[in-house]
């Protein structure tokens, strides 16, 4: 009789069995190591919290500075607009002053002309008055005619006086207006100087805030790098703690009643009815090495006993497969699942849902394929489960 060739599953189980080692009684040392690691982990977690708090404060400061920068930019824009408006106003005042200067020059010229005419007229009147008295004595002119001439010249003189008074009043008003415009322009110039100083101050403040934001961002970047390093340290310590916990659980698992003592006491991994039994014919020359159940899709699958998951992945011919090590070289297999809810290295107990039944691995109908093996050799599940 030919010896059957080992399958890939047999090789996988052999590797898993070789990888399983019996943990010695080092619980006290493991506990001390775990406490030290947990203490370091807590310190790292506290440091990460501090870094996160600092990052939050930096973010709040950056946001506040950016708000101030936005307000400063708006103030700078408004100040620049005010400076432009003041310059336009100064230009308008300059034009008004030039126009006023022209009016003043014209009024002064007219006033000088009127004054000159009055002087000329006064001289004429003075000369005429002396000659009129002489003419009257010599009877060369009619007295009535002379009187009319004097009245006429007096009337002209009065009108010219009125004109001069009007010009003087106009000049006074123009001088007052000129002084007011000059003072207004002086005030505007000072306002422009103040606005320019305000703009420079706002620019300095904005530059300072921008530098502060850049410095905070640099600090935040450094803190992010520090946090990243701390998180890596945290992950390494957490892995160490998990490994120590796994070792402790392994010791606890050894203290649990041995799997061999559970023969005939275990519960089936599913409530479905078997569709193919152990050692029944599968094909002409192949027999079932486990039990096939006729499940509905996504029925929950649970392990038959405490153990550690040593394989949780897809395997050709078995689909999504879970293998659990129960110690003392006992293993159980759960194949053709639709999904797996455990990971390799995870410890499970009979109440844990490890998978949902399916038809992966090329099966036409959904159903769990279940095996128990000892030292790689298939065992009849019916001798173990009830």
Image (tube, rainbow, N blue to C red):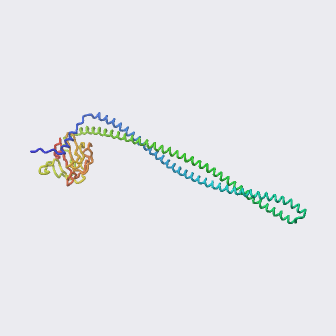
Image point (56%, 52%), residue name:
84
Quadrant showing the N terminus: top left
The reply, left or right, for residue 51 in relation to residue 18 is: right
What residue occupies the far left of the structure in this picture? 1
Give the camera-side residue of 67 and 264. Answer: 67
- Across and down, in percent, residue 30 comes to 29, 35
Determine the residue positioned at 32% across, 36% down.
Answer: 34
Residue 149 x %, y %: 83, 64
Residue 307 screen position, x and y as percent: 24, 42
Residue 84 left/right relative to 136: left
Residue 261 in view in this figure: no
Q: Would you say residue 256 is visible in this rendering? A: yes
Most foreground residue, 14 or 366:
14
232 above or below 135? above
User: In which quarter of the view is residue 20 placed?
Assistant: top left
Q: Nearer the viewer, residue 266 or 192?
A: 192
Q: Residue 86 location, x and y as percent?
A: 59, 52
Q: In the picture, residue 173 is in which quadrant?
A: bottom right
Q: Nearer the viewer, residue 195 or 19?
A: 195
Q: Is residue 160 left or right of residue 218?
A: right
For the image, the number of numbered tags is 0
């Amino acid at each position: 009789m030919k010896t059957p060739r080992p399958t890939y599953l047999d090789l996988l189980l052999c590797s898993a069995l070789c990888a399983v080692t019996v943990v010695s009684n080092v619980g006290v040392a493991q506990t001390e190591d775990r406490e030290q690691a947990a203490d370091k982990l807590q310190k790292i977690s506290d440091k990460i919290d501090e870094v996160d708090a600092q990052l939050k404060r930096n973010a709040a400061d950056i946001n506040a500075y950016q708000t101030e920068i936005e307000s400063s930019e708006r103030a700078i824009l408004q100040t620049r607009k005010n400076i432009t408006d003041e310059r336009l106003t100064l230009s308008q005042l300059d034009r008004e002053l030039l126009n006023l200067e022209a009016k003043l020059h014209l009024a002064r010229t007219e006033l000088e002309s009127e004054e000159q005419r009055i002087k000329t007229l006064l001289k004429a009147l003075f000369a005429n008055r002396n000659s009129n008295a002489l003419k009257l004595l010599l009877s060369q002119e009619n007295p009535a005619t002379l009187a009319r001439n004097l009245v006429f010249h007096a009337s002209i003189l009065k009108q010219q006086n009125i004109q001069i008074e009007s010009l003087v009043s106009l000049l006074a008003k123009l001088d007052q207006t000129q002084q007011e415009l000059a003072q207004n322009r002086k005030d505007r110039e000072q306002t422009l100087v103040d606005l320019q100083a305000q703009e420079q101050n706002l620019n300095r403040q904005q530059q300072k805030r921008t530098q502060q934001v850049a410095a905070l961002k640099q600090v935040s970047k450094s803190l992010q790098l520090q946090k990243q390093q701390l998180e890596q340290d945290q992950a390494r310590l957490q892995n160490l703690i998990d490994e120590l916990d796994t070792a402790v659980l392994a010791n606890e698992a050894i203290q649990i009643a041995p799997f061999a003592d559970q023969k005939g006491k275990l519960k089936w991994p599913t409530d479905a009815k078997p569709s193919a039994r152990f050692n029944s014919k599968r094909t002409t020359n192949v027999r079932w090495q486990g039990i096939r159940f006729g499940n509905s899709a996504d029925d929950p699958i649970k392990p038959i006993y405490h153990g550690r998951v040593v394989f949780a992945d897809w395997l050709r011919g078995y689909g999504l497969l879970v293998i659990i090590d129960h110690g003392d070289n006992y293993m159980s297999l759960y194949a053709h699942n639709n999904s797996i809810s455990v990971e390799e290295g995870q410890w499970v107990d009979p109440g844990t849902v490890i998978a949902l039944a399916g038809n992966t691995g090329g099966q036409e109908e959904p159903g769990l394929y279940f095996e128990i093996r000892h030292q790689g050799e298939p065992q009849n599940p019916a001798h173990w489960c009830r």
